[in-house]
Amino acid sequence: MGMAGRSASARPRDRTAAGGSRIHRWLLGIRHILVEADHLSFVNVYLPWRYPLGSLLMAAVAAVLCGWFVHARAYVLLIGVGSVIGLGLIWPKLSLMALRGRLVFEDRRTVEGKGTRARLVVTNYLPVGSWGLRLHGGEADDSVANLAVVPGWRTTEFEFPYVPRVRGEYPVGTACLRTGFPFGLWEAQRPLESGGSLVVWPLAFPIDAIPEAAASDRTREGLTYLNRAGQTGDFFGVRPYVRGDPLRRIHWAQSARHDRLIVCERQASANLHLQVVLDVDPAVHGGRGPDGSREWAIRVAATLVEAFLARGALVELLAGDRAVSTGSGGQQRERLMDTLARIPAHPSTAIEAMLASRPARRFRDGLQVVITTDRGLDRPGVATIWPRSARAIVLRAGGFERRRGEDGVAASRLPIRPWIELTDADDVRGQFRRAWREVLDAN
C-alpha cells in the first residue's frame, strides 16, 4: 500500500514537469520566430549597415541631420566621417597606380598537389610604401600570397610556394595585386605582367604491368618482341617468385627442384598501342571540384598514359572535342598531359559522338579504353555503337555526389560490362590499383 501510494502521488508531479518543459519549448519557439529568425534574408545584401562604407555613409547622413536640426557642431563629425570615406576610397587606388609587378613561375609544368615556387617582382615608384597587398591568382583563384609592405622607391622580390589543388593552366585569367588599405572600405586592383603560365598536370598514380590486350595482334606479320620482361611475348627465362606474380606463371618443376617458387618471364611486345576515349561531359559526372568523378576520370586517363608511354607504347587520346594523334616518347607525353590539364570546364562532346568518330571506329590492333560513368553508358545509343573490343572503365557518378564517409549508392545494372568499375569515391586510387592487378591476373 505504501508503494502504491508513493507511485500515485508521483504521477501528478511527472505531468506537471512534462507540461512545464512543453511550455518552455513553446516559449523558445516563439522567441526564435520573433527575435532570432531572419525572415528577410534575401534583402540582407542590400542593407547598407552590413558594409563598412554603408555604415559610414549612414553616419554622415545622421551628422547632416543633426547639424541641420540640432546644432552646427555636428558638422565637425561630418567632416571627420567624410575624411575617412575620402581617404579610404582614394588611397588604395593611388598606392596601386605607382606599382608595377611581374609574376614568374619557377617551372613550366608541375603535377597536382606537388606545386612549384613562384616569384613576384614589384617596383614601387612612390616615395612611401604600400601596405596590405594581396596577390590574387586570377578568376578562379583565391588569394595566394599576402604582402605586408612594398617599400617606396624600390624593387622588391617575393618568393613563395604555389600548390594548385587541381589541374589546369595558371594563372586563370589575369593575376593582380589588390589592396583595401587603410580602412578596407573597398579593394582596388592592379593587373600584373605575365612571366609565363604554369601547366598543372593531373595526378597519375603508379600501376603494375600492362595487360596483354594492349599488344598488337600476334597473327600479324612483322610482330616483334623485345628481350626484356613484359606481359605479352613468349617465355624467355625464369626468376624467383615476387609477391603479386600470377600463380599461373609458376614453373612447378623448377620450384620443386629449388624448393622455392620460380616463375616464368615473358617478353615485352614491341607493338603496344593504346587509345583512351575520355568522357568529360559534365552532364554525366557527379560531384564538383577536385573530388568529383570528372577530375578522377581525368586522373585515371593520365595514369594510363604515363604507364603505357613509360613502356614505349603508342598512345592516342580522345577527350571531348580534343584529340591527340598516335605517338610515343617524351614529346607525346607532354602533348597528352598538356591536353588533359587544359580540358575546360564547359560542356563538351558527348560519349556517343566520340565513339562514332572516325578515330574510335577505325581503331584496330591494340587496347581501346573508354573512361566514363554509369550515366554515360545509360545515354541513348551508346550500347548500339559500342566498339566490340573496347574496354570500359566506369565510375559510379552517384558515389561522388554523396558526402565523404557516407555509405555508397546502390549499384544499377549497366548496359555494358565494365572492365574496371570504381564505386568507392573515398579511395579511387586504391580501388583502381587493386582492380588493375585483377585485370593482369585474369590475362
Image (spheres, helix red, strand yellow):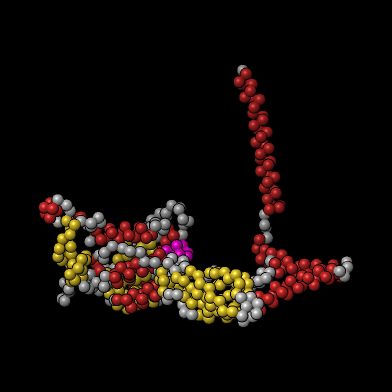
The N terminus lies in which quarter of the figure?
top right
Residue under the image location 18 percent in, 67 percent down:
267
Residue under the image location 34 percent in, 60 percent down:
432
Does the stretch in magenta take in 291? yes
Using the image, determine if residue 439 lies above or below residue 138. above
Using the image, determine if residue 146 lies above or below residue 34. below
Foreground: 328 or 405? 328
Using the image, determine if residue 358 lies above or below residue 241. below
x and y, in percent, of residue 184 in the image: 66, 69
Does the stretch in magenta take in 222? no
Res. 140 in view: no
Examine the image and state in which quarter residue 273 appears: bottom left
Res. 432 in view: yes
x and y, in percent, of residue 280 in the image: 41, 70
Residue under the image location 66 percent in, 25 percent down:
9
Q: Is 135 left or right of 325, judged from the image as shown?
A: right
The C terminus lies in which quarter of the figure?
bottom left
Q: Can you name the residue that lies furthest to the top here?
A: 1
Residue under the image location 36 percent in, 76 percent down:
334
x and y, in percent, of residue 5 in the image: 64, 21
Q: Which residues are magenta?
A: 283-293
Examine the image and state in which quarter residue 431 appears: bottom left
How many labels were placed on the picture?
0
x and y, in percent, of residue 337 in the image: 37, 73
